[in-house]
Amino acid sequence: MNAIVDDNAVTQLELQVRQIRMEANGINSYEFVSPDGASLPPFTAGAHIDVHAGPGIVRQYSLCNSPAERDRYVIAVLKDPNGRGGSAAVHENIKVGDRVRISAPRNNFELRPCKGKVVLLAGGIGVTPMKAMAHQLESENIPYEMYYCAKGPDYAAFRPELEALAKSGKVNFHFDHGDPKNSLDITTVLKHPEGECELYYCGPGGFMEACKVASEHWPSGSVHFEHFKAPVKQADADASVAGAFIAEIASSGERLEVAPDQNLAEVLQAAGYPVETSCLSGLCGTCKVRYLAGEVDHQDFILDDEEKAEYLTVCVSRPASKTLLLDL
């Protein structure tokens, strides 16, 4: 297995595509293995990898197989005709036998220790991290309940594996057949949190908003989510002005000016600081940096309130103050 380090110090692997399967309408799974049969770096449920699908095309996909498996990584990709071209590139460019450059797994959506039941809510292709979580919870004998929402049986990926779990009552399929009036009643599902339980959800924009609203009464710190596409934000005339600011480096005292049309990540990289970037939209957490002083206008979709008090994602977030002291 070849392991290399790119210019931004991101560990990369060159793996071989052993199998591609059609899992549902528009959804293919891709199985990556080491060409020499070596074990792969371990991962935990909720982890993702960067996949280099073509020149200049790098996308993040959740690993959906069991974390206990050390011989393969499995992702599932929905071909989105209205996307930015990444999913189309995966479907069209990657073939069985190809060697593909991917990153080592990273996790910003990890299962937290739980004394009660875990509730998993998956919408469409958002099932990928939830499937890995179900495998991990099964192996650790932790009680859980999973709801998988899709248009219909032909649009539900990994049905054979999940149906085996459904027989035990742990996985519930819900098909709306394309009619929003038939959507899962998420408000009822989440109405009564049971003891010290934890909630995880992932899916398309409307699904994410429904889960957010329905879980607002859950105890602080018990709700976790991951977007696979950056939500569209409404313009806010009162929001922090994205003007110039100074990023001060704590270790050296160097002061870097960031212009209104620059993001903090690119300025740090140009100055020689090893800040890794990947999604450039505040979704993956790769560029998370600790700050020591200053106020931040957080524009990411990955950090929780506790993390935001200490970290920012430098690809999208900017200070609400004129100076920001960074722990670099």
Image: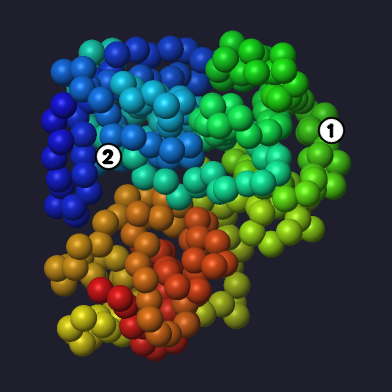
Q: Residue sitting at 50 percent across and 60 percent down?
A: 303
Q: Quadrant of residue 168?
A: top right
Query: Quick check: can you spot residue 85?
Result: no
Pointer 1 and pointer 2: residues touching (CB < 8 Å)?
no
Question: Which residue shows up at 51% across the image and 15% down it?
Answer: 23
Please tell me whether mark 1 sits on a helix, a strand or a loop: helix
Q: How busy is the neighbourhood of tag 2: few (under 14 within 10 Å), some, or many (20 plus)?
A: many
Point out the frontmost of discs 1 and 2: 2
Image disc number at residue 146: none
Q: Which mark is residue 181?
A: 1
Q: What residue is drawn where x is 61% and y is 30%?
A: 141
Viewer-closest of 120 and 174: 120
Q: Quadrant of residue 288?
A: bottom left
In screen coordinates, is 14 left or right of 68?
A: left
Q: Secondary structure at mark 2?
A: strand
Quadrant of res 275:
bottom left
Near mark 1 (Cα within 10 A), the count class, few <14, some 14-19 or many ≥20, is few
Name which residue type carries label 2: Ser
Identity, as a three-letter code, of the amino acid under mark 1? Lys
The reply to whether residue 313 is in sight is yes
Looking at the image, how many numbered discs can be counted on the residues?
Answer: 2
